[in-house]
Amino acid sequence: MKVGRLDHRGNLDAGIQTGKRDRLETDLALSHLKTDVQTELVSRISELGSAPTQVIIREIIEDVCAKVISTSGLRLDLVDYRRVIKDIIDDFLFLGPLQPFLADDDVTEIAVNGSQCIFIERFGRMELTGSRFADESHLRRIIDRIGQEVNRRCDEQSPLMDARLQDGSRVNAVIAPISFNGSALTIRKFNREHMTDSDLLREESLSPAMLSFLEAAVKGRCSIVVAGGTGSGKTTLLNVLSRFIPTHERVVTIEDAAELQLSLENLVALEARPANIEGVGAVTIYDLVVNALRMRPDRIVVGECRGIEALDMINAMTTGHDGSLTTIHANDVITTFTRLENMIRRAVQTYESRTIRAMIAQAIDLVVVVKRFSDGSRKISSITALMGMEADVITTEELFRFEQTGAGARNGKCGSGVMGCFVGCQNPVPELIKRIESWGGMVDQSWFYDVCPTTEGIQRICR
């Protein structure tokens, strides 16, 4: 009996190994086939003289593929044949193995670490895919195609590329010799659907009381800084907050890469521009902030403050442009102040620390910290009011916070796996409330005593 089981298991293992070997041989044959088809395809298209349409290219691909397969004697079933056609079309017209992820609305980010490693972010979590490029040269061709589309170069002389695709997605590429383990490519997809305040509530990014307070604060012309780490949802929240701005106000938005989606009537949207291939023509965020002050804005919305433009932004908030909004890379309130202080000092090195802190305390009303949690969900972790200065320290009052009590499994888009409560800190600030109401905002003091467990949201949404 023992020998028999071993024989049976051995035969089974042999069958599995044979199947794997056959699949590898088929994949190798398909790879050679694609190369032959692409070589013939380039020749056929170059003979046309003029640039063909996508429809004509698809017809040529199918014709060339059929002829090459017939000549090679390779036998393909319908599934493999269709896969070859699709892969070649994606390679020739689009972004190769990345194209299915670009077309998938559930995928929000694509990260390529060399030709054999493609990660995607889905529902806030990164996962390794089974897709890959044929080799490094294949990946470089796709990077070159992206560069051609956005009129940017990415070669040994300029091994870094940061640009925006036609659909609004942001792309960053790094090639050798800077990236010595193979070229790296990151695509942050542009969300075609406008994220709304209802979406934030459904995804349990904040409580209804917090949302109501933030809406009142924006309408009450509070100057707000949204702080958080990479991918924490800063721009998403900034987008939602910006929509609370009264429609009659003149707003100038300034971004490194256009991501805000506002529907205001009196809106001017400005976008920074990198230098061209010759290294000239750059227009920085700082340039745009300085220029925006000459455009008679009621408010300025800066997608991200990260340099000397912070000084002009702070000055704008205290010289008639209160109610302005921006984001900053910082994980908490204290780090937000430190980063702003360092940015301002880079602009004017003669300012003392106390002077800079006093400027920050006078200009900013609220710091909203957003955080990305272990389950991939994004939440507002705190809303803090700036009260002024005591000695050399900026004084603050925390108004709302998220208190995590545990972690569970997240069900796709449904709610959040992180368990806890959004709580009001029972600390309504009279000066802030008076300011908001003086501009027409309405504040319900019960918001500051609200307790909203996320577990109730999970049960409600996923039911």
Image: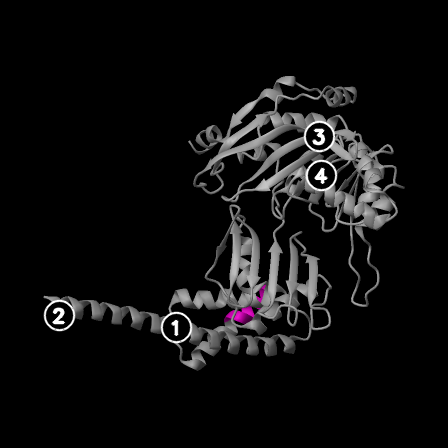
Q: Given the image, on which type of amino acid does mark 3 rest?
A: Thr
Bin the neighbour count of mark 3 within 10 Å (Cα to Cα): few under 14, some 14-19, many 20 and up: some
> Magenta segment: does it hold 56?
yes
Q: Main secondary structure of the magenta part?
A: helix
Residue wearing tag 3: 396
Q: Given the image, on which type of amino acid does mark 1 rest?
A: Leu
Q: Given the image, on which type of amino acid does mark 2 rest?
A: Val
Tell me, what colour scheme is on the image?
one colour
For the residues labelled 4 and 1, say whether their Cβ atoms are less than 8 Å apart.
no
**Circle 4 or circle 2, nearest the eye:** 2
Residue wearing tag 4: 262
Q: Nearer the viewer, residue 355 or 83?
A: 355
Distance between the alpha carbons at the discs numbered 2 and 1: 31 Å
- Quarter of the image where one finds residue 11: bottom left
Residue wearing tag 2: 3
From the viewer's perspective, is 420 left or right of 296? left
Residue at x 53%, y 26% (from the top left corner): 452
Res 24 label: 1
Label whose residue precedes the other's in the sequence (3 or 2): 2
Measured as percent of width and height from the top left, residue 409 is found at 43, 41
Bin the neighbour count of mark 2 within 10 Å (Cα to Cα): few under 14, some 14-19, many 20 and up: few
Distance between the alpha carbons at the discs numbered 4 and 3: 31 Å
Which element type, helix, strand or loop, lies under badge 4? Answer: loop
Distance between the alpha carbons at the discs numbered 3 and 1: 62 Å
